[in-house]
Image (spheres, coloured by chain):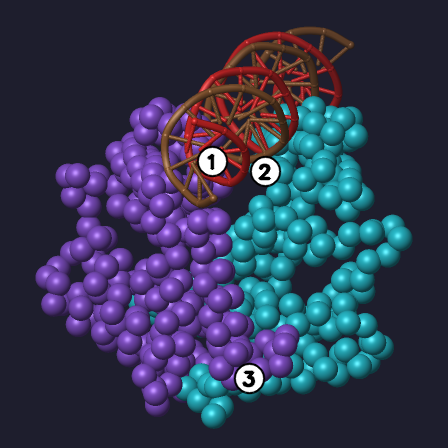
Chain colours: A purple, B cyan, C red, D brown
Amino acid sequence: MPMSAGGLRELKKNRTRQLIADTANALFRARGFDEVTVDEIAAAAQVSKKTVFNHFPTKEDLVFYRAEDREAMSLAAVTERPAGLSILDSFRALCLAQTRFVPGMRRDLVHPRSFFDLVSGNPSLQRKMHEVNERITRVLADALAAEAGAEPGDPLPRIVASTLVGAQRALYRRLRQRVREGGPDEEIERAHRADVERVFDLLGRGLGGYPPA
Amino acid sequence: MPMSAGGLRELKKNRTRQLIADTANALFRARGFDEVTVDEIAAAAQVSKKTVFNHFPTKEDLVFYRAEDREAMSLAAVTERPAGLSILDSFRALCLAQTRFVPGMRRDLVHPRSFFDLVSGNPSLQRKMHEVNERITRVLADALAAEAGAEPGDPLPRIVASTLVGAQRALYRRLRQRVREGGPDEEIERAHRADVERVFDLLGRGLGGYPPA
DNA sequence: CCATTCATTACACTTGGTGTAACAGTACAC
DNA sequence: GTGTACTGTTACACCAAGTGTAATGAATGG
């Protein structure tokens, strides 16, 4: 009963999975999501179509196979934050650190389409993106409920989670927009920092006074 | 150049649309979403498959063809609220009024599956649901941005919108759970009212103190 | 070396969804 | 009324995503 530890079989399986994902994403970024069929991907990776679907339940999963990382980071911001730091402040730090994704937001010759270009140009990928956000919200809500000792069904943890994820998304979106508009990195970072402060200031004070008269 | 006003053609088109939607939903609720093919729906409605897809771009849209109502109600809670009422309070009222959906949450002999049973049992319908929520959030964010006179790209309206929609969803979810657990209507309504107060109290005061130590 | 496990494969099949050109009933002008 | 433009519907051919199944062959463990 071999575990998922480093057997040769396991190794090859992971290689195949990585090969398929890499091949697929290269094709997607070169030509667009809809313009590449799964048959093509399979052929390019020298693998059967069935194998592709054995590793990735849907074509969209080929694009989002790294989503677990984001989920883990968001969860860690709650469960592994320094003692004494509030959840809100911990998430603020997470949002500030988003600037580290700036390089990946820029297109280059090798990647004529960014990951985001793929998603924004395709409804089914957008749906998948929402599904990912939804999942993160759920995981976060569970962690919050556990920490707060909330009764099962308590809506509060869910709402806090949904607000945090919503803030994260809106700030990410704003950052992307700033990157698109161009300008030096320091300028973008300064503006982003200001955005984060405004947002978390609002969340900290409460929404009752929004919009300011 | 006839407008979409009451010509005979328009009338028949609407009838066909309604017939298709009704036929489809009856079949879905009787046997489940995946267990009914579009070909079947078309046959049952005595219409061609192509006509079904002319009226509803995807099979999922057959289930959610009333989503616009919810969108309109949420939007109205912002744009058509009484003068002097804050957005937060207006949305609180909207959430309180959710109890009017309680009857529809119960199954009966005619409807062995509730609308929610359909959605909760099917990933693609859940994705569609998220898409609807996403759309409402966007519409709401635009309305908030307009009212606040926010600069284009300002993340605040979006975050407020996402929080409000998140609250609405969490409270709806909680209400559904209470209905499932059973009990007299007045009891459910009282509990729901308390939930709403707790949630909007938190949103009004700010999230900084969550969870309470 | 043998037996078992399991990732992969070929293949046939279902179903959601599209494109197109023809058809049929409505609208409207004369 | 009669002809004509319009447009919702249809039949039909087609594409691509995804599934089920039985067979193959390499990895594994004794």
Residue most extreme to the bottom: B213
Question: Which residue type does callout 3 highlight?
Answer: Gly
**What residue is rendered at 58% in x and 82% in y?**
A150
Q: Quadrant of residue A76?
A: bottom left
Same chain? Circles 2 and 1: no
Towards the viewer: A55 or B157? A55
Question: Please, which chain is the residue tagged with disc 3 on?
Answer: A
Residue on which the image places disc 2: B58
Numbered disc 2: secondary structure:
loop
In the rendered view, would you say B180 is above or below B14? below
**What residue is rendered at 59% in x and 76% in y?**
A155
Residue on which the image places disc 1: A53
Numbered disc 3: secondary structure:
loop
Towards the viewer: B73 or A88? A88
The quadrant of the image that shows the N terminus of chain B is top right
Same chain? Circles 3 and 1: yes
Numbered disc 1: secondary structure:
helix
Q: Is residue B183 visible?
A: yes
Q: Residue A149, which numbered label?
A: 3
In the rendered view, would you say A81 is above or below A16? below
**What residue is rendered at 52% in x and 72% in y?**
A142
Q: Badges 3 and 1: C-beta atoms under 8 Å apart?
A: no
